[in-house]
Image: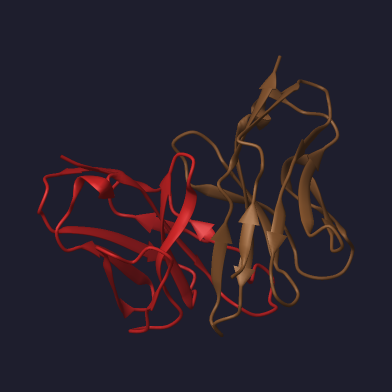
Chain colours: A red, B brown
Amino acid sequence: DVKVTQSSRYLVKRTGEKVFLECVQDMDHENMFWYRQDPGLGLRLIYFSYDVKMKEKGDIPEGYSVSREKKERFSLILESASTNQTSMYLCASTRPGTVSGANVLTFGAGSRLTVL
Amino acid sequence: AQSVAQPEDQVNVAEGNPLTVKCTYSVSGNPYLFWYVQYPNRGLQFLLKYITGDNLVKGSYGFEAEFNKSQTSFHLKKPSALVSDSALYFCAVRDQTSGTYKYIFGTGTRLKVLA
């Protein structure tokens, strides 16, 4: 089975701290995504990447950056955390194409970040 | 812009009754449509997808969804609900307009199945 692993399930940080959220997938997927999930707002796309060192802004990129130095790893960075970034962060991956399982997102368990 | 709407924040249904969770979409071109489920404190799990072919798609745990192009809908259904189906359900569409693929999600519908 495809596995997407997020390094931290729960984090508590202080305003202004730099925060790294790590995501690793083990199925050689080309595409990786970072979403945040908030009650009543569903999942909102922050950034995505379709190849190593490639990144594209999603719908809410402000205050975030990403890094994809290796195919299996996609990191989300909060340069200076703020209280309005308190949220559940979900990483996902997939591959495009027509092979079995293509185009289906596989999600990690999520990282719940609290910024005080 | 492509979008997904889930008009109901919550759906309540008695165990054993049929359930429907609604989803409508707005896309250009042929849609790739998905349903995901989220149990408490868990990530999202894939239920089913429509890409092409038969309008009635069958998925995991006895769920199915009907693609209706004229109504731009992709409602999730199950003939007989179980208490264990209680969860948060998300409809999603794949957006291809920018030349790369991103996935747009609805706001989610909480399903409560009452014993």
* Left or right of A49 on screen, residue B109: right
* Left or right of A114 on screen, residue A17: left
The C terminus of chain B - image quarter: top right
* Left or right of B48 on screen, residue A62: left
* Left or right of B11 on screen, residue A71: left
- Residue A113, image x, y percentages: 27, 45
- Residue B9, image x, y percentages: 60, 35
Quarter of the image where one finds residue B98: bottom right
The N terminus of chain B - image quarter: bottom right
Residue A112 in view:
no
| B84 and A1: which is toward the camera | B84
Residue at 68%, 76% (x, y): give it: A99
What number of labels is visible?
0
In this rendering, the answer to whether A37 lies above or below A79 is: above
Quarter of the image where one finds residue B2: bottom right
Residue at 76%, 20% (x, y): give it: B15
In this rendering, the answer to whether A10 lies above or below A36 is: above
- Residue A104, image x, y percentages: 61, 64
Residue at 52%, 61% (x, y): give it: A2
Residue B62 in view:
yes
| A62 and B13: which is toward the camera | A62
